[in-house]
Amino acid sequence: MEEIASNSKLPKPLFGSRYIGMRKPYMVKTPWWLKKLYPARLWHVDTEKKILYLTFDDGPHPEATAFVLNELKKHDALATFFCIGKNVLEWPDVYKRILDEGHAVGNHTQNHLNGWRVSDDVYMKDIAQAANYIDSGLFRPPYGRITSFQAKHLRSAMRGRKPKIIMWDVLSADFDTLITAEKCLENVIFKSRPGSIIVFHDSEKAFSKLQYCLPRILNFFSEKDYRFDTLKGMDEEGEPV
Ligand SMILES: [Zn+2]
């Protein structure tokens, strides 16, 4: 995501800032121009209705995913889980529970590869391997990085499923060890709007922040009459990549 990353609007680092001399390598809110640059990729759902699309990357994970599923259930909330193939193999019961509880799943490669850093051949084979275990046309590239060539050949890598690349509107930044859980919560509360696709991680690294943020986010938006839905079917209805 580093190219997504350069944020010219960030204020100049203040003296004493822990970001002094460096920029955060991501943007919490995806800017309009980036969405325009890749219009075939889904960045948010165009709706005025109070619906949010929570997404959880990098699972399944026995504790983090179980926690997410329990919290979602309390609010009758549905979500989309972009799973890593090797984690599906390692935790098949957790993966099955995601499906059994009505959530959507998507392909997040077999080994969490960065499409810019490996050859096209290696990348496409990794997606194809994950497609053996994850039955979905939804695809989210790890780190948000996929080349136009790779995107164009996604359909054959996903074994003929009509693919849809799912990006995001809001990053919770739960993966950022330099920010607090409160900041992570603020990112989502202040930047989300109807139709937002929001990224979290059901992973070891993000778990402590997730435990703080997710219940509060579900409460906050439920009280404002929002509902939470899956991105199921977006691969069928969406534009081809
Ligand atoms: Zn990931």
Image (cartoon, rainbow, N blue to C red):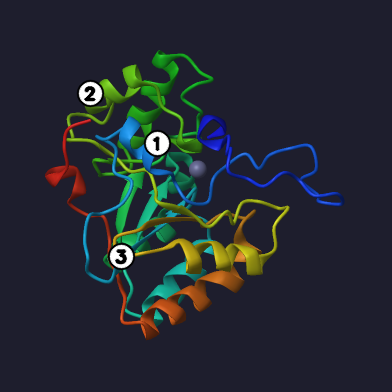
- Check whether the beta carbons of the residues at disc 3 and disc 1 lie within 8 A of each other: no
Label 3: few (<14), some or many (≥20) within 10 Å? some
Disc on res. 194: 3
Q: Secondary structure at mark 2?
A: helix
Q: Residue at x 22, y 65 (%)?
A: 48
Quadrant location of residue 64? bottom right
Residue 63 can be seen, yes or no:
no
Q: Viewed as shown, does residue 69 lie left or right of 203?
A: left
Kind of residue at disc 3: Pro
Q: Position of residue 108 (x, y in %)?
A: 41, 40
Residue 156 bears which disc, if any? 2
Say whether residue 71 is left or right of residue 231: right
Residue 135 in view, yes or no: yes
Q: Earlier in the sequence, mark 3 or mark 1?
A: 1
> Is 225 drawn above or below residue 158 in the view shown?
below
**Depicted 80 relative to depicted 189: above or below:** above
Identify residue type, mark 1.
Leu
Q: Quadrant of the C terminus?
A: top left
